[in-house]
Amino acid sequence: MSEIILHQYPQSPFAEKVRLMLGFKGLPWRAVDIPRWMPKPDLMPLTGGYRKTPVMQIGADIFCDSACIARELERRYPSIPLFPEGTHGVGRMLGAWADSVLFFDVVGTVFGTHGDSAPKELKEDRYRFSDGMIDLARYKDDQAHIRSQLQAHVFWLEHSFDDGREYFVGRKPSYTDFCVYASMWMLMNRVPELGFFSEAPRLRGWLERMAAIGHGMHRPMDAKEALSVAHAAQPDTISVSNPDSPVGLQPGTRVSVSADDYGKDPVLGYLLGLNAQRIVIRRGDPVVGEVNVHFPRAGFRIVPA
């Protein structure tokens, strides 16, 4: 089986989410460090335009979005589950809340507090790629409200442990824990001076337990080598059960896939599979040949190209 290759950068909270999931499952992986902002010339041949971080590559199959990555890791390596029995629905719902509502309150707090010192390129890139949603000047002006919202969410998280549990939806770490940890990791590391965890001892204990999982066995890989791996591999044969295809979107249809919140750069290709959980398209590039690009269904728009 091909190696797991993670295209990431150290400061990315969603990359931290995946790094920790890989450590939890005990999987060896390779790390390709990518730029924090565009251009990303060695990532675009793989994704066809998708630019968010991280992206997982296994041979000539490319997995976009950390939710899609988690689902694929679970499919290939189920022995240490991210979704213990009974958590598939509620775990994903809570994870989606953490990846969106909680994440943006943390982003607003971090960038609103330290935005003045952020690189000019980062400010401009995030503003463009979010269609103005990530606006460091607006965050700075609205800090009182943003921090109040985040404090409310930290209160919820702290009191999730009132019954003595050690993790959010069970006795062991699950997908929800990794989603929440990504944002809390960013908050803890970027603005420790704000003291959000000072009155949350159980949440602090949970953060320590999660951090102790670690990132597992990983080695760096050059970006050009990752491109060569894709070029030398054959994309997987895709069989998607329980089809739930919009009218007109049958396998073989040329489609455009894009995120529906931010980073909406479209990816064009031919539809291979579509159901309530995932989208898979086939596309070609002179650098990498033919690849399958995988997306989650929730949070992504698919239309005929």
Image (cartoon, helix red, strand yellow):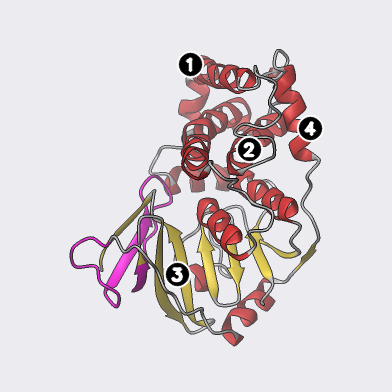
Q: Position of residue 158 (x, y in %)?
A: 64, 20
Q: Nearer the viewer, mark 4 or mark 3?
A: 4
Secondary structure state at the residue bearing disc 4? helix
Q: From the image, which quarter does the C terminus lie in?
A: bottom left
Q: Amino acid at mark 1?
A: His
Q: What is the crowding at mark 3: few (fewer than 14 residues within 10 Å), some, or many (at least 20)?
A: some
Q: Is residue 233 left or right of residue 264?
A: right
User: Where does residue 175 sit, x and y in percent of width and height?
Assistant: 59, 44
Q: Position of residue 159 (x, y in %)?
A: 61, 17
Identify the disc placed on residue 145: 1
Whole-number angstrom distance, CA of label 2 to CA of label 4: 12 Å
Q: Residue at x 63, y 29 (%)?
A: 114
The answer to whether mark 2 and mark 4 are in CB contact below 8 A is no
CA distance for labels 1 and 2: 26 Å
Question: Is residue 256 found inside the magenta-colored segment of the image?
Answer: yes
Q: Earlier in the sequence, mark 3 or mark 2?
A: 3
- Which mark sits nearer the N-terminus, 1 or 3? 3
In this orientation, which residue lies closer to the viewer: 60 or 104?
A: 60
Residue position for label 3: 48
Q: For the residues marked 1 and 3, what is the alpha-carbon distance in whole angstroms?
A: 38 Å
Residue identified by numbered label 2: 177
Q: Write down the region rendered in magenta.
A: 245-273
